[in-house]
Image (cartoon, coloured by chain):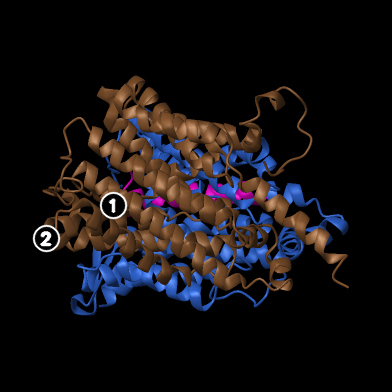
Chain colours: A blue, B brown
Amino acid sequence: MLTILFDGIAYGMLLFILAVGLSVTMGLMNFINLAHGAFAMLGGYLTVALMQRWGWPFLVCLPVSFVVTALVGAVLERTLYRPMYRKPHLDQVLFSIGLTFMSVAAMDYFMGSSQQIMQLPDWLRGRTELFGGALGMGHYRLFIIAVCAALTVGLQLILSRTRFGSQLRASVDDAVVARGMGINVNLVFAATFAVGSGLAGLGGALSAEVLGLDPTFPLKFLIYFLIVVAVGGTSSITGPLLAALLLGIADVAGKYYIPKLGAFIVYSFMIVILLWRPQGLFSRLGGGK
Amino acid sequence: MSTPVKPAEAQNTDALLKASRWRAWEPLLWLAALFAPLVFKSHALLVNEIAIVALFALSLDLILGYTGIVSLGHAAFLGFGAYSAALFAKYINPDPLLGLAVGTAAATLLGLLCSFTIQRGSDLTRLMVTLGVSLILYELANKLDWLTGGADGLQGVIMGPLLGRFEFDLYGQTAAWYSLTVLLLIFLLARRLVHSPFGATLKAVRDNRLRAMAIGIPVGGRLTVVYTVAAGVAGAAGALLAQTTGFAALDIFSLERSADLMLMLVIGGIGWLYGGLAGALVFILMREGIAAITPQYWTFWIGLFLVVLVLAGRDRLLRPWTWFGKSRKQGGQP
C-alpha cells in the first residue's frame, strides 16, 4: 500500500518535471506543442549514449542532458517555432506532430528500435524496507523524488522571487500589456522554452530506467504530458504539480490493483475532469482568454 | 416593408444555389473513379484502400473543415465501426450490407454520446477529450481479448457475397467497386448537407462562434448533429475496411491514424469536399512510393512534409502560382 503510494509519487514527480515546460509554454503563447516528448526522448538517449559508449558517470550525464536539450530547444524555438505562434491551432498541431514523427523515425534510424537499457550506478540500485516491509523504497526512486522536489522548489522560488519570474508571470497573465510595460516577451519566452525543453530532457534522462526508452517514447507519453497540462491548468506550476502527482498515483495504483483495466481508468478520469472543468482542475476561473 | 428585404434574400439563396451547382468535371471524375478498378486491375486493392480512406477523410472534413473542431481522435469512430462490422459478420450475419449498416449505426451512436464531450472548452480540451476517447477504445479492444482478439486483432471474418451475388475476390475488384459506390453515395449526401442552409450555419459556427450564437444559431445543437453524422461516416469507412480486408486490428485506433488523416485533409485542402478525396489519393500514393524506397523510415518524410507544409503556409499548396510570389496574407480561406 505505502509502496504503491511511494512509487506513484516518484512517477508523478517525473511526469511533473517532464511536463512543466509544456505547461508554461502553452500558457504563455497559447501554443499547442505536441513535440514536447521529443525533447524528453533526446535527453534520455543522450544519457544512455554517453554512459554506455563513453562511460561517463551518471551524475555528469544528467546536467549535460539538461544543457544540450535546452540548447536544442532554444535553437528550434528561434528557427522553427516562432513563426507558428500566430497560426491557428490546427497548424500548430500539424507542425508539432510532424516534428514528433521526424524525431521518432530519426531516433529509430540512429539508435535502433529496441528498448534501451540503462546501467545505473551501484549506489542507486538497492532498496530499503521500512515499517517491517510495508514500505519498500527503491533507492533510484528516492533519488528521483529528491531531485524533482529540489527542482520544484527551485522553480517555485525563481518564479515567485526573481525579476525574471515576475516578468514571466506578467507575460503569462497578459502578453500585450507586459510588452507595453517594456518586458521583452519574446526573450522571456525563448528562455522559458529552452528551460522547459531542458527540464524535459532531464526528465527523459531520469525516466529512462523507470518508463523505458524506445523511439516511440514521444507518442507513448504524449497523452500523459497533455493530461498534466490540461488537468493542471496553465496558469501556475502548483496546478500541474498536483495533477502530475494525482496522475502518477492513480496510474500506479490502477495498474497494480486492477491490471485488467490498465490505463483505462486514467483516461476516463481525464475525460470526466475535463467535462466538469474544461479549463483545468486548478485554474483560476475565466483566465481572460 | 418587405420589398427592400426580398432582393437581398434572393441574392443569398442565389449564392448558395450557385455554390451547390454541379460542375461539368464532377460526373466525369466519378465515372473515371468507377472505371479505376477495371483499368488498374492488379491494383484494385489499392483503389479500395484509397476509396475507404477518402471516405474517412470526408468525415473529418465535415467536423474540421466545415465546423472547425480540431480532433485528434477521429480514428475512434473508424475503429468502432470496423470492430462492430467485423463482430457482426463473424457472430451474427455475414451479409456485407447489413454489416455496413450495423457499423455505421454503432459509430453514429458513439458519435452522439461523444458529441457532448466536445461542446465546451478550448481547442486543447477538445484535443484531449477526442484523443482520450480513442485511447479508451484502444484499451478496451486490447483488454477484451475474448471478444476482439486483443493485440492479435480480430481474425477469421468471412464475408458473404455482396447482394447475394458478387463474391469478394482475392484481387479486390468487388471490394473496390463496393467501397467506391458507398463513397459516392455518402459523398452525395455530404454534398447536399454542406450546401444546405444547415451547412451554411456550420460554416458560421466555424468562422465565429460568438456571432453565430448572436444571430440565433443553436451552436450546441449544430455541433451535436454534425459530430454524430461525421462519426457515422467514419464508422461506415471502418466497416468497409473491416469487410474488405477481412479483419480488424488494434492499430486502427492509434494516434498515427488520426494524424495521417489530418495530413491527408490538409494536403487536399480543408473545407472542401473534394479535398479529402484528393488528399487520400495523394497520401496513399505518396506512402506507397516512399515506403517502396525506405520501408522503415517513411514516417520521417511524412513528418518533414508536415513541417514544411505548415511553415510554408498550407493554403498555398494547392496554388502553385503563389509559390514564388510574396505571401500577402496568412490564413486566408481557400
- A208 magenta-colored: yes
- Segment tinted magenta in the rendering: A191-215
Q: Which residue type carries mark 2?
A: Tyr
> At which x and y percent is residue B256?
39, 45
Residue contact between numbered discs 1 and 2, judged by CB atoms under 8 Å = no
Q: In the image, is residue A147 above or below residue B152? A: below
Regarding residue A204, the answer to whether it shows in the image is no
Kindly identify the residue that appears in the image at 63 percent across and 35 percent down: B311
Residue bearing the label numbered 1: B239
Q: In the image, is residue B49 above or below residue A193? A: above
Local secondary structure at mark 2: helix
> At which x and y percent is residue B160?
14, 48
Q: Nearer the viewer, residue A107 or B127?
A: B127
Q: Which residue type carries mark 1?
A: Ala
Q: In the image, is residue A279 above or below residue B123? A: below
Regarding residue B244, the answer to whether it shows in the image is yes
B222 left or right, relative to B322: left
Q: Which mark is residue B91?
A: 2
Would you say the magenta stretch is mainly helix, strand or loop? helix
Return the disc, 1 or 2, that comes first in the chain's sequence.
2
Kindly identify the residue that appears in the image at 32 percent across and 64 percent down: B105
A82 left or right, relative to A22: right
**Chain under label 2?**
B
Kindly identify the residue that appears in the image at 47 percent across and 41 percent down: A100
- A155 magenta-colored: no
Query: Splitting the image into 4 quarters, where does residue B93 fall?
Result: bottom left
